[in-house]
Image (cartoon, rainbow, N blue to C red):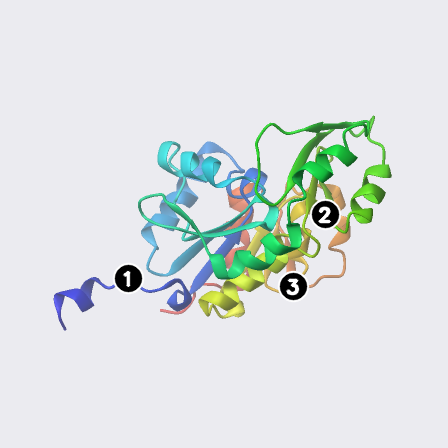
Amino acid sequence: MTRHETMQIPTIAEKDLVLATDLDGTFLGGTEDECRAFYDWIEENRSRVGLIFVTGRDPGFINHLTRKQGVPRPDYVIGDVGTTIAAFDDSYHVSPIEALETEIAEAWGDANRKVESALHRVSGLKLQSAAFRYRVSYDMDPSRFDPVAFDLVAEMGLDALMSADRYFDVLPKGVSKGPSLLRLLDHLGIDNRKCLVAGDTMNDHSMLAMGLQAVAVGNSEPALVEALDGHDHVHRAKEHGVAGIAEAILRFGFLTKD
């Protein structure tokens, strides 16, 4: 065996477990000690565990999180509520996968200004300051929110998603975390049976409900737990955040083979 062969790192498709996880409340959830123990476990098992962040956060946030705050670096990122699909290398560089983003870009077109104009006067919505490529996002006040926003978005041929009772996202039609994750897994040749999906809010519903082994961590919002009723492939964890993910890894028997 050559030195090169000895040092060769398995591709993500060759690993025994691929964890596709939301960030806030899920991979970033739990006590400081629980997070540190779980992150250390990830790093110690990089040859067997692949990591995909599936989040509403943007790539800049993920870059800072992994470079400055001690969070493990993902292999791939599905960001911006499914509208960004990118590789994430060991230099913390985000590289959008053009073959997977082309359809997203076409479905969105140049809708930013149209969405902002249509929802400008809707009560209970405050436009987020960050500029996104293929989505428009708002902070939402549920006590003042006018549901007419859903009708306005539908009239534009786009999708609206409310989550955590505080966020309102406008997305390209048919684009969300779940469909984007399935496309990435197929693109990478990952066996879906090796994948564990983890989340805690309604913007995780599309990926938790699609049939892959999944966990709704113990601190999941009630609306998500209710929406997942009857989905036997989803483990409802007792533990919060990363401890809930660890609970599911044991529950489903991942990494039990030598």
| Residue 43, percent from left and from top | 34, 48
Provide the secondary structure element on which disc 1 rests.
loop
Report the Cα–Cα distance between label 1 and label 2.
37 Å
Q: Secondary structure at mark 3?
A: loop
User: What is the CA distance from the residue labelled 3 to the residue labelled 1?
Assistant: 31 Å
Location of residue 13 by image quarter: bottom left
Report which residue position mark 1 lands on. Answer: 9
Give whichever of discs 3 and 1 has the lower sequence position: 1
Residue ID at (59%, 59%): 103
Q: Which residue is found at the position 43% from the left and 45% from the top?
A: 38
- Image quarter of residue 80: top right
Foreground mark, 2 or 3? 2
Q: How many marks?
A: 3
Q: CA distance from mark 2 to mark 3?
A: 15 Å
Residue, disc 2: 224
Other-residue count near label 3 (Cα within 10 Å), few / some / many at <14 / 14–19 / ≥20: some
Which label belongs to residue 233?
3
